[in-house]
Image (cartoon, rainbow, N blue to C red):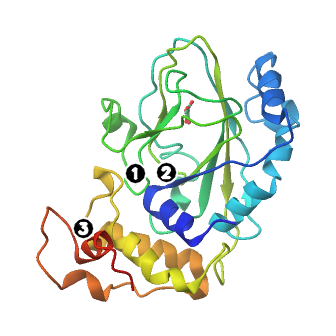
């Protein structure tokens, strides 16, 4: 199960990374099976790669997905094996299926779906990792408006160890980057959906963490895109928490936010100053 802080990070950043422990050689065997696969099986991944079902049923994966999507989540039809062969150019930034299937079910203040990206090999910076922009999942952008964007402040790369999984909000801005190496890089992607509203937190929740979580929701800005007025991004984060936390809701308005000393630097809020100063509660 994820912790309160991992859930808060997911709400703020739109992603979390987990590292399930597998049987020896599991990732190597998957990599080899992908390497000899005659063609991309499209959405028929479990049929073409039966060992992937061990990953989908792994307690760490099930625990993380249950934490984000509640019990009874389902795997959506589809999925894709993203092969990034040597010497490719980068993809444009995009949001998956933003204007296609599933778009109408999405909103910026809930976690109804999650995207899983599994890397069966170590991914180094030159091997075409996926780039993602933390905090971008609440910004709708058309593919046309993103096509000229290149490096964005706050972007992070999936330079991970074999077996790592990047779990993201379905609307996170991301792209495959150019593979400058001589090695092929694989990533296997699946989408999952919530099937029910949670009556209580479906993660490892401790009510004693609530005030610290609230400070984080009010004050963290992982990228320029996530730096917005209190009433938009911050309120959407709190509403997201409330929509997935059931009985562990928090008040929408923060008492601490609007009053107090003037900011000492651009945009600093009372909450962020208190956090900087190590004040909790
Ligand atoms: O290959 C990658 O790293 C990302 C590709 C991807 O997620 C996509 O095309 O939607």
Task: Determine whether the residue tagged by mark 3 lies in a helix, strand or loop.
Answer: loop
* Residue wearing tag 3: 229
Q: Residue at x 77, y 26 (%)?
A: 31
Task: State which tag comes first along the sequence, 2 or 3.
Answer: 2
In which quarter of the view is residue 64 placed? bottom right
Task: Determine whether the residue tagged by mark 2 lies in a helix, strand or loop.
Answer: loop
Question: Residue 191, position in %: x, y?
Answer: 66, 49
Q: Tags 2 and 3 in contact by the CB under 8 Å rule? A: no
Name above or below for residue 177 compared with residue 229.
Answer: above
**Badge 2 density bin: few <14, some 14–19, many ≥20, Cα 10 Å:** many
Query: Which quadrant of the rendered structure holds the C terminus?
Result: bottom left
Question: Residue 98, position in %: x, y?
Answer: 48, 47
Q: Which marked residue is nearer to the observer: mark 2 or mark 1? A: 1
Name above or below for residue 173 compared with residue 266.
Answer: above
What distance separates the C-alpha of mark 2 from that of mark 1?
8 Å
**Badge 1 density bin: few <14, some 14–19, many ≥20, Cα 10 Å:** many
Ligand 1 shows up in which quadrant of the image? top right
What distance separates the C-alpha of mark 3 from that of mark 1?
15 Å
Q: Tags 2 and 1 in contact by the CB under 8 Å rule? A: yes
* Residue wearing tag 2: 171
- Tag of residue 136: 1
Task: State which tag comes first along the sequence, 2 or 1.
Answer: 1
- In the image, taking residue 133 as reference, residue 166 lies left or right, namely right
Task: Determine whether the residue tagged by mark 1 lies in a helix, strand or loop.
Answer: loop
- In the image, taking residue 161 as reference, residue 95 lies left or right, namely left
Q: Residue at x 69, y 60 (%)?
A: 65
Residue 274 visible in rendering: yes
């Amino acid at each position: 199960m994820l912790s309160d802080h991992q859930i808060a990070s997911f709400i703020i950043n739109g992603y979390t990374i987990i590292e399930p422990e597998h049987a020896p050689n599991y990732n190597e065997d998957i990599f080899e099976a992908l390497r000899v696969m005659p063609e991309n099986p499209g959405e028929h991944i479990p049929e073409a790669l039966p060992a992937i079902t061990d990953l989908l049923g792994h307690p760490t994966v099930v625990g993380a997905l249950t934490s984000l999507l509640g019990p009874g989540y389902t795997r959506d039809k589809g999925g894709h094996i993203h092969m990034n062969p040597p010497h490719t150019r980068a993809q444009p930034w995009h949001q998956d299926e933003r204007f296609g299937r599933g778009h109408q079910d999405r909103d910026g203040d809930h976690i109804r779906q999650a995207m899983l990206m599994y890397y069966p090999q170590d991914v180094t910076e030159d091997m075409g990792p996926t780039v993602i922009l933390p905090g971008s999942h609440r910004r709708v952008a058309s593919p046309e408006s993103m096509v000229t964007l290149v490096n964005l402040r706050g972007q992070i790369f999936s330079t991970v160890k074999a077996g790592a999984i990047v779990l993201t909000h379905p609307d996170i801005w991301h792209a495959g980057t150019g593979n400058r190496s001589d090695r092929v890089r694989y990533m296997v992607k699946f989408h999952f959906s919530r099937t029910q509203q949670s009556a209580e937190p479906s993660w490892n929740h401790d009510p004693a963490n609530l005030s610290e979580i609230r400070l984080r929701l009010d004050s963290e800005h992982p990228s320029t895109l996530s730096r917005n007025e209190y009433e938009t991004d911050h309120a959407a984060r709190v509403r997201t928490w409330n929509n997935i936390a059931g009985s562990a809701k928090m008040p929408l308005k923060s008492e601490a936010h609007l009053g107090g000393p003037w900011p000492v630097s651009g945009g600093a809020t009372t909450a962020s100053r208190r956090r900087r100063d190590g004040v909790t509660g």
